[in-house]
Amino acid sequence: MKRKYYFIILFLILAIFLSGCAGGGIVTPATDEAKIKTVINDFCSAVNDQNWSKAESYCIYGSDEYLGVSQVESLVNNMYSYCNIITINYIPNVLNVSISGNYAQAYTYLSFIASCDGTFESNNNYVTFRLQKIGNTWKLY
């Protein structure tokens, strides 16, 4: 009989513990500012991975940013003629986001490090990403 109560109490404690770990709190939707920061970070990650189609998917088709991805891709492909290993690292730090309706600007400190067979180039600069909201998604343009 004691064993039966022991398992029932153990089950209840486990259920209470697991429900607490599931984050039973209120889930708030991401703000536009958070979505914009995510788009910029994911875009830079795609470029770093040299996943050009994924990087383009964060841009409005035909926009300056979209065409910029194609230019970087061409540059990297040309570099492969004299480099075996090419790495790209864009590291964005979004400092300020300004939203006006379906348009936004993200003032960002962008660090850039690239290497070609171990020879490094780096640059740090402030850039302003321009974004447009299409539906519920922000895209670079």
Image (tube, rainbow, N blue to C red):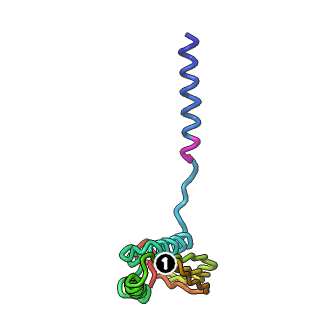
Q: Position of residue 64 (x, y in %)?
A: 43, 89
Q: Position of residue 14 (x, y in %)?
A: 56, 32
Identity of the residue furthest to the right in this view = 95
Residue shown at the point (55%, 73%) measured from the top left: 37
Q: Which residue is mark 1?
A: 117
Q: Visible in this render: residue 98?
A: no
- The quarter of the displayed image where residue 22 is located: top right
Quadrant where the N terminus lies?
Answer: top right
In this view, 7 is above or below 82: above
Could you say which is closer to the camera, residue 120 or residue 18? Answer: 120
Residue 23 magenta-highlighted: yes
- The quarter of the displayed image where residue 17 is located: top right
Label 1 crowd bin: few (<14), some (14–19), many (20+), radius 10 Å: few
Residue shown at the point (48%, 78%) measured from the top left: 117
Range drawn in magenta: 20-24
Question: Is residue 50 found left or right of 32 in the rendered image?
Answer: left
Q: Position of residue 53 (x, y in %)?
A: 36, 75
Callout 1: SS: loop
Q: Position of residue 110 (x, y in %)?
A: 58, 81
SS assignment for the magenta stretch, majority? loop
In this view, 125 is above or below 92: below
Residue shown at the point (61%, 81%) measured from the top left: 109
Q: Visible in this render: residue 34?
A: yes
Quadrant where the C terminus lies?
Answer: bottom left
User: Mark 1 is on which residue type?
Assistant: Asp
Could you say which is closer to the camera, residue 15 or residue 75? Answer: 75
